[in-house]
Image (cartoon, rainbow, N blue to C red):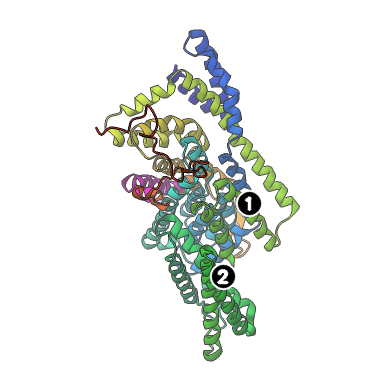
Amino acid sequence: MAPVMFASLIVFLLLGYPVAFALAANGLVFALVGIELGLFQPNFLQALPERIYGTMNNETLLAVPFFTFMGLILERSGMAEDLLDTIGQLFGTIRGGLAYAVIFVGALLAATTGVVAASVISMGLISLPIMLRYGYDRRLATGVIAASGTLAQIIPPSLVLIVMADQLGRSVGDMYEGAFVPGLVLSGLYALYVFIVSMLAPKAVPGLPKEALLYMQPDGSRGTWKLGILVVFSGLVGVFVMKQTGVKAGADFVILTMSLAVMVAFIAAACNHYFGARRLVLTLASTALLAAAYYFLKRYEHETFALVAEAAAFGFAYAIVVGLVERFSGLKLISPIAEQVTFVMVPPLGLIFLVLGTIFIGLATPTEGGAMGAAGAMILAIMKRRLSFGLVRQATESTAKLSAFVLFILVGARVFSLTFYGVNGHVWVEHLLVSLPGGQTGFLIVVNLMVFLLAFFLDFFELAFIVVPLLATAADKLGIDLIWFGVMLAVNMQTSFMHPPFGFALFFLRSVAPKDAYTDKVTGRRMEPVTTMQIYWGSVPFVVIQLIMVALVVLFPQMVLHYRGSGPTIDPSKVEIRLDMPGLGGLPGLDTPPDLGGGLPGLSPPRSP
């Protein structure tokens, strides 16, 4: 009966029925059929209300609306537009610079929004017209935008990772930490592909013309090397400060180091921009106060705040050096492009570190991190003077729709799985997968092929709710780490957004790409529309890159398994167990616990073997 249930579910989905109702209807219909045939116990249905209530009472899934709301507020407050404009200017005349900017901003949006639709639509509206204006190959331009948008699925705080952790019964924090490095590596592979194209076909990815460059210095130069000095100095300070902590490796060390470096860079740039002639006096006073605060906090063992004060003092110290150099040599050490990049990038980066940093170090749960991220996104929108009641209302409505969508699918999956488990479907799947030839290797090959093929017709939510729970039992039986298994599946399921005919990222891009010929507002040239086939063909190289990333995760599991070594380690030989016996210490003659082995009648001391 289990194979028939699964096959009928696939048929219902291919016929276009809503996923949640197809799941629930299959579960209930086959439960009745199973009762009639004597294959299903009616008592199972009594557990259905409790399973549904348990789903609605799941605190882990509360992170879904928080992160969705955070992403929508950031996307609609214009953050994506500011980032794309600034990073595009930073890469300037470099061949493929706009494509690099899209990948870089796609990774940043992924780490702030966690929603694929928001990332793809934002970058499609903002960067696609600019790339077409300056002569980018249409297939590469559409492919890089769609692929960079799908990074929101693998880079934390991804919604699919929350669902995956819930279905696998594992910690969302561990899942986030395990996916952090593969997400960065995948972004690097996208950039490597653009670099190879720029070397083999430079006309496909031209750089910006000089007349399109902004944020120039008075002498006409750009001064990007000054940004490099600021970044290197801030990074060295971050590493130096983090070396003083107990965090030595892994995603924790990386993200906390970067957070400190961002703070240093922002303080240095802000002093240069706002203090003006008073810079030396104010920065000297601030540095002295921070140094005093550092020693005071260190003395009273407030280590975390002491490290923050130390890093901030370095930022002010850099501002002092800049002020002295500019005063006595006339050379400006912070250029307009350096200031612009710092001020535009620091707020979203600070939000990323606020959310992921607190989750990684164990200060907050993913749900609490999502709540802080939602509040932080509203604060950033207020700082940009872009928060309005209408924006909050739209974001709230969209969040409610997506959250209800996820919850209804999960409730339907609970109904389906109850019947499926009642007819021993999980045993059938487990025996089928565990008995595959080749052990773990054969299992991984079959699972990846199956997920890749199912992704042509199902999206990642459907795969996560229907397929993953069936695979998890067999993977656990074979001794496979479920965090690693979940990250590998998440990278594979990412292709569901990219390959025809049902790639949602392609649909999102199609909805905002020009369908008809139009006149460019800047150049006045007549531009041809972007065809659907150009979007489809542009996605093919990036689907191949995603499959290469799946192979890398399989071949180099330590990219994910580093999460194991990031927590506190305990030496069993140093564990001390104390037995407190209240009341005995206060009685006369019982300052020490009595010898229960031989001091009581009928109890003899234990014998040696």
Task: Check the image and name the residue furthest to the right.
Answer: 389
Magenta region's main secondary structure? helix
The residue type indicated by label 1 comes to Ala
* Viewer-side residue, 314 vs 503: 314
Q: Quadrant of the C terminus?
A: top left
Quarter of the rendering containing residue 339: bottom right
> In the rendered view, would you say 519 is above or below 598?
below
Residue at figure coordinates x 39%, y 56% from the top left: 193
x and y percentages locating residue 453 in the rendered image = 41, 34
Reading the image, the residue beneath label 2 is 266
> Of helix, strand and loop, which one carries label 1?
helix
State the SS at label 2: helix
Q: If the image is split into quadrants, where does the N terminus sit?
A: top left
Q: Is residue 563 left or right of residue 510?
A: left
The residue that label 1 is drawn on is 374
Q: Are marks 1 and 2 in contact (CB under 8 Å)?
A: no
Nearer to us in this view, 390 or 135: 390
Identify residue type, mark 2.
Phe
